[in-house]
Image (spheres, helix red, strand yellow):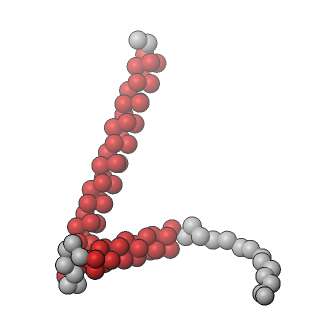
């Protein structure tokens, strides 16, 4: 192998390790957030395995998604519309 090929292979391996480390962090964050949501719903009086508990978990996820979207500032637009009501 030439030095250039060895350098390219080393770079690819390094990038692969870096990306796999990021994926591990994300799955740990998700697991931690799931545990927090679980505890919050139990503290609010919902019994695990019930429909009400499932609704609690879903509502917490919806709130987090709305906050994430609001914080990202990704929804900005300008438009002009004409409507006719019948």
Q: Is residue 32 left or right of residue 5?
A: left
Relative vertical location of residue 65 with respect to residue 27 in this rendering, above or below:
below
Quadrant of the image containing the N terminus: top left
The answer to whether residue 42 of the structure is visible from this angle is no
Residue 13, how many percent across, how many down? Answer: 36, 30
Between 82 and 4, the one lying in front of the other is 82
Between 49 and 73, the one lying in front of the other is 49
The answer to whether residue 20 of the structure is visible from this angle is yes
Residue 69, how many percent across, how many down? Answer: 49, 70
| Residue drawn at point x = 22 percent, y = 67 percent | 35
Quadrant of the image containing the C terminus: bottom right
In the image, farthest residue toward the top: 1
| Residue drawn at point x = 41 percent, y = 30 percent | 12
How many tags in the picture? 0
| Residue drawn at point x = 34 percent, y = 42 percent | 20
Q: Quadrant of residue 85?
A: bottom right
Q: Quadrant of residue 6?
A: top left
| Residue drawn at point x = 19 percent, y = 74 percent | 48
Residue 14, how many percent across, how many down? Answer: 36, 34
Between 45 and 37, the one lying in front of the other is 45
Q: Is residue 29 left or right of residue 4?
A: left
């Amino acid at each position: 192998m030439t030095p250039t090929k060895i350098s390219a292979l080393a770079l690819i391996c390094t990038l692969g390790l870096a990306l796999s480390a990021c994926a591990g962090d994300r799955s740990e964050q998700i697991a931690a957030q799931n545990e927090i949501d679980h505890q919050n719903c139990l503290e609010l009086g919902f019994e695990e395995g019930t429909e009400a508990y499932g609704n609690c978990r879903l509502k917490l996820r919806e709130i987090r998604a709305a906050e994430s979207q609001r914080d990202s500032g990704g929804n900005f637009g300008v438009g002009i519309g004409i409507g006719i009501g019948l």
